[in-house]
């Protein structure tokens, strides 16, 4: 019997990490272990992982010798660490190099954007990627666009508000900018394929379930629900003004997590709807591989299917435990 590749997953209790863990389990192709902070060991989400028989390492990322022990024998290291802790990944890299990791998948999993200058979040991620390349560790970068779970409109009836993070209907500019979208649940299913594919080694890969503009999203929601959706338009000038305000507030106090989050979100809006970065043509210009082309046998969840579930009360609100 062939030995399964061993995967060590950091950030397994977050939204993306939970999807990745489930996708790896569903595939049945991996020996999975999880890395958590010692302070997180007693959290219900971590205990639930342990109850599934998954080996869990509780290690401070500053403890290099212990990290090398955890990484010994690991084939693939995947990070789904939170956005405010991205630079903590750097503490893993030398240990990963020393342990002979065959592939590292750093925390990417966002929209398509240029490597510098358009989004601070992207800039910070690329800083980690560059350190990986400097050390010569084999890698794969996986981006997923925006989630369906944070891309759907509210209905006049309020039927899908239970699953919404922010039930506000805003159309950015004229609503025609196409965007790469992936169902959160499909991220792990894509990852399970990508990480054991030699074609994706030392490559950037993007996933998607649908490529839709806001106008198309609203039209699908209206067709499925039978309701007429009202919205407010946000002009390019308003988007740029909001970004300038967010940047100013952030620069005054970069350590404030709320100001950082607001800045991130403002840059997302600008990148998606003004620059129009998050689309297949730009991804391919940047050299990404298309996961749908790589795995034509895999049919991801469509946005329409997701919204039908949401209307039926079967969707899950993201960040509900945050």
Image (cartoon, rainbow, N blue to C red):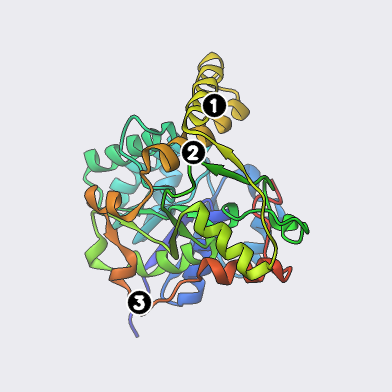
The label nearer to you, 3 versus 2, is 2
Query: Residue sitting at 32 percent across and 55 percent down?
Result: 280
Task: Give the side of residue 173 with respect to residue 298, left or right.
Answer: right
- The residue located at (31%, 41%) in the rendering is 129
228 vs 62, left or right, is right
Q: Quadrant of the C terminus?
A: top right
Which residue is denoted by mark 3 in the rendering? 3
User: Measuring 47% from the left and 69% from the top, which residue is drawn there?
Assistant: 24
Task: Give the mark, 1 or 3, whose residue is nearer the N terminus.
Answer: 3
Please say whether residue 18 is visible from this viewpoint. no
x, y (%) of residue 222?
63, 63
Q: Around disc 1, counting alpha carbons within 10 Å, would you say few (fewer than 14), some (14 to 19), or many (20 or more)? A: some
Sequence order check, earlier mark of 3 and 2: 3
In percent of width and height, residue 11 lies at 53, 51
Of pointers 2 and 1, the one earlier in the residue sequence: 1
Q: What is the crowding at mark 2: few (fewer than 14 residues within 10 Å), some, or many (at least 20)? A: some
Name above or below for residue 64 compared with residue 208. above
On residue 269, which mark appears?
Answer: 2
Which quadrant does the N terminus fall into?
bottom left
Label 1 to label 3, Cα distance in Å?
A: 52 Å
Please provide percent x and percent y for residue 21.
52, 64
Q: Is residue 96 above or below residue 87?
A: below
Instruction: Give the residue at the far top of this rendering.
Output: 252
Which of the 4 image quadrants contains residue 234? top right
Q: Residue 242 has which mark?
A: 1
Q: Secondary structure at mark 2?
A: helix
Residues at badges 2 and 1 in contact (C-beta under 8 Å)? yes
> Which mark, residue 310?
none
Q: Residues within 10 Å of mark 3 (few under 14, many from 20)?
A: few
Q: Is residue 153 left or right of residue 80?
A: right
Q: CA distance from mark 3 to mark 2?
A: 45 Å
Q: Is residue 28 in view from this perspective?
A: yes
């Amino acid at each position: 019997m062939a030995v399964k590749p061993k995967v060590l997953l950091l950030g397994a209790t977050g939204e993306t990490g939970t999807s990745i863990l489930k996708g790896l389990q569903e595939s049945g192709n991996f020996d999975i272990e999880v890395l958590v902070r010692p302070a997180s060991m007693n959290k219900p989400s971590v205990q639930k992982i342990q109850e599934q028989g998954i080996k869990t390492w509780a290690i401070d990322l500053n403890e290099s010798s212990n990290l090398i022990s955890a990484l010994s024998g690991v084939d693939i290291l995947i990070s789904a660490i939170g956005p405010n802790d991205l630079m903590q990944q750097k503490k893993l890299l030398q240990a990963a190099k020393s342990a002979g990791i065959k592939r590292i998948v750093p925390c990417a999993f966002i929209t398509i954007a240029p490597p510098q200058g358009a989004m601070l979040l992207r800039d910070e991620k690329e800083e980690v990627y560059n350190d990986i390349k400097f050390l010569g560790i084999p890698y794969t970068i996986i981006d997923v666009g925006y989630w369906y779970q944070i891309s759907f409109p509210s209905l006049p009836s309020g039927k899908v508000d239970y699953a919404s993070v922010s039930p506000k209907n805003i159309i950015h500019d004229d609503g025609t900018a196409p965007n790469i979208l992936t169902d959160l649940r499909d991220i792990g299913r894509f990852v399970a394929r990508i990480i054991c594919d030699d074609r994706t080694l030392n490559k950037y890969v993007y996933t998607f379930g649908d490529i839709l503009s806001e106008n198309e999203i609203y039209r699908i929601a209206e067709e499925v629900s039978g309701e007429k959706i009202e919205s407010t338009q946000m002009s390019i000038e308003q988007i740029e003004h909001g970004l300038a305000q967010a940047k100013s507030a952030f620069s005054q106090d970069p350590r404030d997590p709320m100001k950082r989050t607001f800045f991130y979100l403002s840059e997302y809006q600008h990148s998606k709807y003004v620059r129009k970065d998050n689309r297949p043509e730009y991804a391919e210009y940047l050299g990404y591989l298309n996961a749908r082309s790589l795995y034509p046998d895999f049919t991801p969840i469509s946005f329409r299917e997701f919204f039908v579930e949401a209307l039926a009360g079967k969707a899950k609100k993201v960040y509900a435990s945050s």
